[in-house]
Image (cartoon, rainbow, N blue to C red):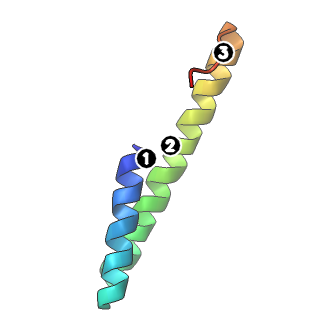
Amino acid sequence: MLNWALTFLVVAIIAAIFGFSGIAGAAAGIAKIIFFIFVVLLVISLIANAIRGKSPKI
């Protein structure tokens, strides 16, 4: 999921460089949403593993 957020971020940067402001704004918005979903799922996973007594895998 983090890969998708980074992909949309790169698309937004490239679109902004070429002056496509509408596409850049949309891609940046999608990247933000996907990134925050990733962070929420990460926190939920860490909390669930802490409750179960497992240490996080690195």
The Cα atoms of the two marked residues, 2 and 1, are separated by: 6 Å
Q: Secondary structure at mark 1?
A: helix
Residue 11 in the image: above or below residue 40:
below
Q: Please state if 10 lies on the left or on the right of 51 as rendered.
A: left
Check disc 1 and give the amino acid type. Leu
Q: Disc 2 vs disc 3: which is toward the camera? A: 3
Label 1 to label 3, Cα distance in Å? 22 Å
Q: Quadrant of residue 1?
A: top left
Mark 2 vs 1, N-terminal side: 1
Crowdedness near tag 2: few (<14), some (14–19) or many (≥20) residues, C-alpha within 10 Å? some
Q: Position of residue 53 (x, y in %)?
A: 70, 8
* Location of mark 1 (residue): 2
At label 2, which amino acid type do we have? Phe
- Amino acid at the residue labelled 3: Ser
| Residue at the image point whose x is 63% and y is 34% from the top | 43
Determine crowd level at label 1: few under 14, some 14-19, many 20+ residues with C-alpha closer than 10 A.
few
> Mark number for residue 55?
3
In-image side of 33 versus 1 (left or right): right
> What secondary structure is found at the residue carrying circle 2?
helix
Q: Residue at x 31, y 69 (%)?
A: 11
* Residue 20 seen: no
Query: Comparing marks 2 and 1, which lies closer to the viewer?
Result: 1
Please give the residue where the numbered disc 2 appears in the rendered image.
Answer: 38
Question: Are dots 2 and 1 in contact, CB under 8 Å?
Answer: yes
